[in-house]
Amino acid sequence: MPNLLAARSQMAVSLAFHIVFAVVGIGMPLLMVVAERRWLATRDPVYLDLAKRWSKGTAIMFAVGAVSGTILSFELGLLWPWFMEFAGPIIGMPFSLEGFAFFLEAIFLGVYLYGWNRISPRAHLGAGILVALSGAVSGIFVVIANAWMNTPSGFRVVGGHAVDIDPVAAMLNPAAFSQTLHMTLAAYAATGLAVAGIHAAMLLRQPANPFNRRALAVGLLVGVPAAILQPLSGDLSARHVAEHQPAKLAAMESLFETRRGAPLVIGGWPDVESREIRLGIEVPHALSLLAFGDPNAEVKGLDTVPREDWPNVPFVHLSFQVMVALGTYMALVSLWAAWLAWRRREIAENRRLLRLLVYGTPMGFVAIEAGWMVTEVGRQPWVVYGVLRTADAVTPMPGLIVPFAFFSLLYVALAVAVVWLLRRQILESPGLPDRRGRPPLEQGVQHV
Amino acid sequence: MSDGLLPLLLGGAVMLSLNAYVLLGGADFGGGVWDLLASGPRRARQRALIADAIGPIWEANHVWLILVIVLLFTCFPPAFARLSVTLHIPLALMLVGIVLRGSAFTFRSYDSQRDDVQRRWGSVFAGASVVTPLLLGVAVGAIASGGVPPAPSGTFLEGYVRPWARAFPMGVGLLTVVLFAFLAAVYLTLEADDDALREDFRRRALGAGVAAFGAAALALALASGGAPLVWRELLGAWWALPLHLATGAAAIAALYALWTRRWRLARAAAVTQVSCILWGWGLAQYPYLLPPHLTLADAAAPAVTLRLVLGALVLGAFVLVPSLYYLFRVFKTRPA
Ligand code: HDD
Ligand code: HEM
Ligand code: HEM
């Protein structure tokens, strides 16, 4: 395996792994806070139980998020030293701010997890709110850095060096708003609907269980609005991509030729050799309309980019289709749930909706992975779009396949351990007698 | 503010963060060392005390390392790039240690409380707690000995292994492990809630304190051949004698306080001692960030960046300091 490919693969595996935990770290604190707030308001002990149980799962996920994020911070240098040497002064600012968000998140998560009996309920809820806020803020800062890689601004290149550096302008790069909005919504949609899906599955088995009913309600409260807004925010992202990263948009849509009144292709498989798309459904003029708000606007195709600078078109196209398909499903199911809630119908008793929610459990996470593949693979061969090539950023250290293989194995081991431990937590849900027949509340953790 | 001062201020911020990481995160690793070495009739309670002590705070303590990394690549980008290239192997191994320590520690408290399960996670946690500081020290030792060139040259062994696989970096690694264990034992005397347990850690702290003398002497001796720049400064510079005196005095004060069971004094002295050693290294290298080629000023990012980061640090401190104070007040003051 060539060194560059090994480095790219290691980066991809590390990020794809971290994002799962990062998303949970953004979403779950909000769910915990909602549950705890309801406990304080209603004194319904089921909500307290919910907040405590969720906080155990979150503690596991957070620890893995912290260590996998640490790997990433080092990997920026271990794999891409020349990228960091170039980009550090320009885009280090959001990373530094993110550092403070990490501090707050870690500090108040410690207070939240271990402080149930040490501080007042109000202070405890306050700690939870700070965890939720700083989690969202830390996600926003990293994504700002990533948006800069997609639409670099705040510097000029003279003789291979960056001059006239303006870190504030770099943070306010064109993609920053659309990407951070889309990512933050994604985190809430994915965690909210995943939690709703898990508890919907339990409700299908035990329709009356109050624990699962409340859990479903909190999950939907967070997941449904985000999932409904997500296609709108995705549309905004797509417009920005069309304007600032034409090669990526062309790859997403497999548009080989520049044209006016470009159609939107749904599904299909791009054949890069013959430069055409097979088996897709074409919606005439839709791409021009969606990307530029004018059914006859010109959309740049891959023919505007030298062949050797194309990203992997089939991969980007497929990933985009997957994200949009899943996003559509999540939004439609969410609309149904919102409509039922508005009509004051009991969602927990609608078995058909419960079943659709169960199918939706993993979808947000899959859509997130797919969306990042669009963003990152679609940017290739550039690490900083139009400025620095990935091949020029990679470390000279030989034999990168060794760390790639090694870290991949490490991730597999961590994933197995996390799945095992979370299964243990979920199986202990109240009402589900565990395999050893012990009553659930006496098992588990020494803290809390 | 004059732009010439900026690199110095931000270099100072890097050192302060590293200092905080060593005193806080370092002690968490030291706790892992004592988990590994737990022995005697109170072995299980020693382990439980260590777990309770680091449980609520290790993630916050860990962020200091992230801050060091972020400040390095933002403010001193060429240094970060060169370090990452030449020290790829020890840094990657250190990462493995960080990952295994943190995850095994958390998994242990959330997995089955059965003994065999607990011991399995416990041994991963403890093993990683020894390996990680060792490699951190090795990386520091490699930097101090002038092992990080602008670009690696020669064979794989010459470029990527020899800079750190030498006696002096290993000596610094050993010293790091011993100092972290010393800090942890001293802190744990204050955490223990009964006398027998406190005596266990008093004995361990005394042992580690004496071992630290040995390890420091060894590292210094190896420096004469292995890290000539640091060696010359540590012997000859105007600040060297006062610093050695302060370090020595703190070390003796720590041992004396442990001996006479003045726990708070012991903690203050141990903190002073370890900080003096760290700043001694920093001063000995100054003005170099990566001796003998790259100075702090040459490595510095443009002044705009430095000024913004400095501003962010100052503002951030207003949020961070009260939060940290709150964390430690909630968990580190025993209910009366
Ligand atoms: C719950 C997850 C989720 C869902 C349902 C969607 N997305 Fe998405 N999408 C993401 C999660 C995501 C993401 C993983 O968070 C990305 C990667 C980078 C980013 O900022 O967000 C992303 C990127 C991304 C991009 C590329 C942005 C860039 O490269 O700068 C576009 C154009 C869209 N999305 C468009 C959509 C559309 C039209 C959707 C309609 C349903 C949609 N997304 C649903
Ligand atoms: C879109 C991508 C990313 C998002 C949304 C994100 C978000 C988060 C969040 C919310 C956390 C908190 C820990 C948790 O809840 O599990 C976290 C942890 C962390 N992330 Fe990421 N992250 C992303 C990518 C990255 C990248 C690229 C890096 C490295 C450069 C990184 C470095 C870190 C570090 C160092 C931590 C640990 C902080 C701690 O110790 O608490 N993250 N990330
Ligand atoms: C967490 C969600 C993310 C995922 C799943 C992801 C995925 C990927 C993938 C698949 C690649 C390899 C692309 C290729 O070489 O074909 C990559 C590269 C990279 N990503 Fe991301 N990415 C994420 C977020 C980020 C963020 C937030 C940053 C920076 C702040 C970032 C920085 C990089 C860098 C520096 C590379 C290497 C250079 C390159 O290949 O362009 N990524 N990422």
Image (cartoon, coloured by chain):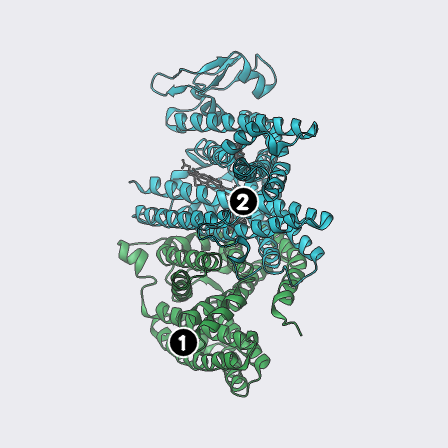
Chain colours: A cyan, B green
- Which image quadrant for residue A152? top right
- Above or below residue B299? Residue A301 is above
* Amino acid at pointer 1: Ser
Q: Does the beta carbon at disc 2 come under 8 Å from ligand 2?
A: yes
Residue under label 2:
A24
* Amino acid at pointer 2: Val
Quadrant occupied by the N terminus of chain A: top left
Mark 1 or mark 2, which is nearer to you?
A: 1
Provide the chain ID for the residue under circle 1: B
Q: Residues within 10 Å of mark 1 (few under 14, many from 20)?
A: some
Mark 1 to mark 2 CA distance (whole Å): 39 Å
Query: In the image, what residue occupies the spot 54% across and 44% down?
Result: A24
Provide the chain ID for the residue under circle 2: A
- Above or below residue B137? Residue B79 is above
Q: Residues within 10 Å of mark 2 (few under 14, many from 20)?
A: many
Residue B39, numbered label? 1
- Which image quadrant for residue A235? top right
Q: Position of residue A288 (x, y in %)?
A: 55, 16
